[in-house]
Image (cartoon, helix red, strand yellow):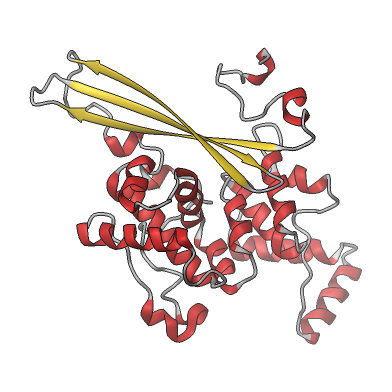
Amino acid sequence: MSEDNYDSSGKLSNRLDSVSRHRSEREFDINSDIDTNIDVGPESDETKIQATCLITITDTDTDTDTDISLTMTHNNSNIDNNDSAPSFTQLRSDGGDPSVRPPADREEPVGEPVVRSDPAITGQRAREAVEFDPTDPAGITSAAQTVQAFSENTVGADDNVYILRGAAACAALVRGVGSYKQAVERAGGDVSISFVRKWARVHDLPQAIRRHVARGDIAPTAAKHIARVSGLDRLDLAWAVIDADLTVREVRRIASEVDNDTTAAEALAERGITVGSIELSLPIPLYRELRRRASVENRPPGQIVSNALEDTFETD
């Protein structure tokens, strides 16, 4: 593999070179996560650090996954076990300090049925919403059972709210047991790491996107690919699904193109989709006034609406 596959920090890029990527005229996505476990021995100066790199190779034509797991263990008896040492939650790939996460991530506690319990979204079913508390052994057990049933697709296959429930169970189980590998072992059956990881990421999407999934505006399979990108690219891609009526296949391909050099807006623009373009219906009096002011002030209607919304939303 050529040096072009490495980024400026020396890390292996998620993109294969053009020869290996298209050799069979098929495209593949490579996604990786690192689970880190820190075990402190009976002696305060004995520490074992184990890092597992979980790599998933996805055939974008068939949407099938191949999981590869690489584990490295390091024992060190000279590490000071003091308050300044990084905690497990700071190092784990599925957690960390919520205050430093980008605004396009979930802000509510993991496992809490914020969307599923909203009657405006789910109606009478809101009372049936289940919470998976990752700090409660009973909640972890419930999450493990739900993940196994969810993976078997025995019930609720076409029910978006049920799928969000399964996604919540995946995220809560990972948070509760500490890693994807342990989550899969706890769930049992044919549950795979890639399955748990994909749906846990859907649970980590911001509430605004999850609400559209529950309403049926965004297909859960499309949400899986939206969740693969991070930051504001998630929002841009999600709103494009609604405004441009993107198919799941299109979402998957766009998500594969988004990286440090290509934003979602740029990938969408290559397909003739402009992020920020939206069709609005206004009450007739407001429509008349908007058109009048736009004409008198020699400005397009969109600019007047944009200025008004900036004041309302207090955006930068």
Residue at (61, 25) in percent of width and height: 13
Q: Is residue 84 left or right of residue 97?
A: left
Residue placed farthest to the front in the image? 189
Residue placed farthest to the left in the image? 43
Residue at (63, 62) in percent of width and height: 311
Residue 316 in view here: no
Q: Position of residue 198 (x, y in %)?
A: 51, 49
Of residues 48 and 151, the one drawn nearer to the viewer in this rendering: 151
Q: Is residue 289 left or right of residue 79?
A: right
Residue 32 in view here: yes
The correct choice, above or below, for 42 with respect to 205 in the image is: above
The correct choice, above or below, for 115 with respect to 51 in the image is: below
Q: Is residue 314 left or right of residue 275?
A: left
**Image quarter (top left, top right, bottom left or bottom right) of the N terminus:** top right
Q: Position of residue 192 (x, y in %)?
A: 45, 46
Using the rendered view, name the quadrant where residue 278 is placed: bottom right
Q: Position of residue 2 (x, y in %)?
A: 68, 14
Using the rendered view, name the quadrant where residue 178 is placed: top left
Q: Is residue 92 left or right of residue 206?
A: left
Residue at (53, 51) in percent of width and height: 104
Residue at (56, 50) in percent of width and height: 227
Q: Position of residue 207 (x, y in %)?
A: 50, 62
Q: How many marks?
A: 0
Of residues 205 and 198, the one drawn nearer to the viewer in this rendering: 198
